[in-house]
Image (cartoon, coloured by chain):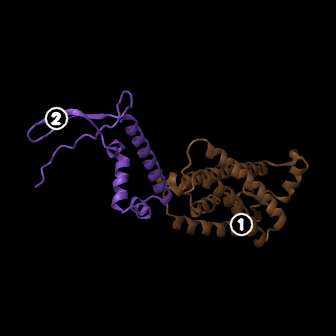
Amino acid sequence: MKENLPALPSLPVSCPSCQSALVVSQLSCPNCETVISGKYGLPILLQLSKEEQEFVIEFFMSSGSLKKMAAQLGISYPTVRNKLDDTIEKIQKLSKEIGNRE
Amino acid sequence: MELLKTLLFNPFEKYSETILLVFGIAFTVLGTLLGFYFDARFDGVLDMHFVRNATLKEVALDNLIAIFCLFIFLFGAAKFINSKTRFIDILNTILISRIAIYLLALSPKPSDELTKKLLQNDFSQIDNFDISLLMIGAFMALLSLVWYITLLFNGFKTASNAKKSLPIILFAVSIILAEILSKILISYFN
C-alpha cells in the first residue's frame, strides 16, 4: 500500500522580498539525511508558475495539439494558443536572464 | 456565476470555433428576420434605425455589409497585432457580438405621431406613457451598445492576444473606419 506522505509545499521560484529568481542552496536526502550545500540555479521549467508548468505538461501529453488541448481543458483554441504564446515569451525572457547571468 | 459572465461577455475564451460559428450564423439569420419583422434596419456597424417598411433584402444586405466592413478592419488590425490571428476567430467575434444589436429591434418603436411631435420640437404634447417608452428605448440602446462593444473588444483581444494600449487604439480606429465604410456601401448598394 502506498504510504500517505504529507503534501510538500509548492516550490517558491522568486524571492518574496525583491522578486529575483531564487537558487537552490541546499538539498537533502529524506532517507539517510545527507545534506548537500551549494548554489544551483533552478531549471527554466521550475521557474515557471505552477499553472504554467501544468500547461507545459498538458501540451506535452497532448503531443502539441492545441485543438486537443482546447477540448481537454474546455477552453477555446485562441485561448490555448495565447497561453502558449505567453509561456513561450516567459521562457524566452528567463533564458535571456540566465544567459546574462552566465 | 463565472460561467454566465463568460457566456455574456467573453464566450470566445471558452467555446470552440464551431459552436460559435453555428450560433453566430443562426443569430445573424434570426437578427435579420427580427429586423424585417419589426421594420428595423441595421444600416451601419453601430446603427439600428426603425423605418416604415423594411424589405428582407434591405435588412439582409445592410447586415451583411456591416459584418463585411467590421471584418475587413478588425481582421486587418488583429493581423497587424498578431500574425497568428485566425480568420474564423474574428468572424465569430463579429457574428456573436451583433446579437446585442439585433436585440435593439425589440426595443419600443416610437409611433408616427410621436416622431412627428419630436421632429417639431413639440414636447408639451408628449404624454407620460410615450416618455416612458422613449426612456426604455434609450436605456436599451445604451445597454446594447455597451454590450456590443464589450463583446467585440473581448473577441478581438482573445483572437489576437492583444495586450497594452496600442490594440485599444487600433480597435477604436477600426470600428470608426468600419462605420464610415459601411455607411458609404449601404448608401451605394441599398
Tell me, by letter, which chain the rendering colours purple. Answer: A
Res B158 label = none
Residue at image location 38% in from the left, 28% down from the top: A18
Please tell me whether mark 1 sits on a helix, a strand or a loop.
helix
How far, Cα to Cα, is label 1 from label 2? 70 Å
Query: Three-letter amino acid code at disc 1?
Result: Leu
Instruction: Out of A88 and B40, give the one closest to the viewer.
Output: A88
Q: Residue furthest top?
A: A17
Instruction: Out of B68 and A64, give the one closest to the viewer.
Output: A64
Instruction: Specify whether A64 is left or right of B71.
Output: left
Q: Chain of mark 1?
A: B
Query: Three-letter amino acid code at disc 2?
Result: Ile
Check disc 2: other Cα within 10 Å, few if <14, some if 14-19, many if 20+: few
Residue B119 percent location from the top left of the image:
89, 51
Residue B78 percent location from the top left of the image:
61, 54
According to the picture, the residue beneath numbered tag 1 turns out to be: B64
Residue B109 in which image quadrant: bottom right
Tell me, by letter, which chain the rendering colours brown. Answer: B
Please tell me whether mark 2 sits on a helix, a strand or a loop.
strand
Check disc 1: other Cα within 10 Å, few if <14, some if 14-19, many if 20+: some
Check if mark 1's residue and mark 2's residue have beta carbons within 8 Å.
no
Which quarter shows the C terminus of chain B?
Answer: bottom right
Query: Do the dots labelled 1 and 2 sit on one chain?
Result: no
Does any portion of residue A23 appear in the rendered image?
yes
Residue at image location 56% in from the left, 69% down from the top: B22
Does any portion of residue B141 appear in the rendered image?
no
According to the picture, the residue beneath numbered tag 2 turns out to be: A36
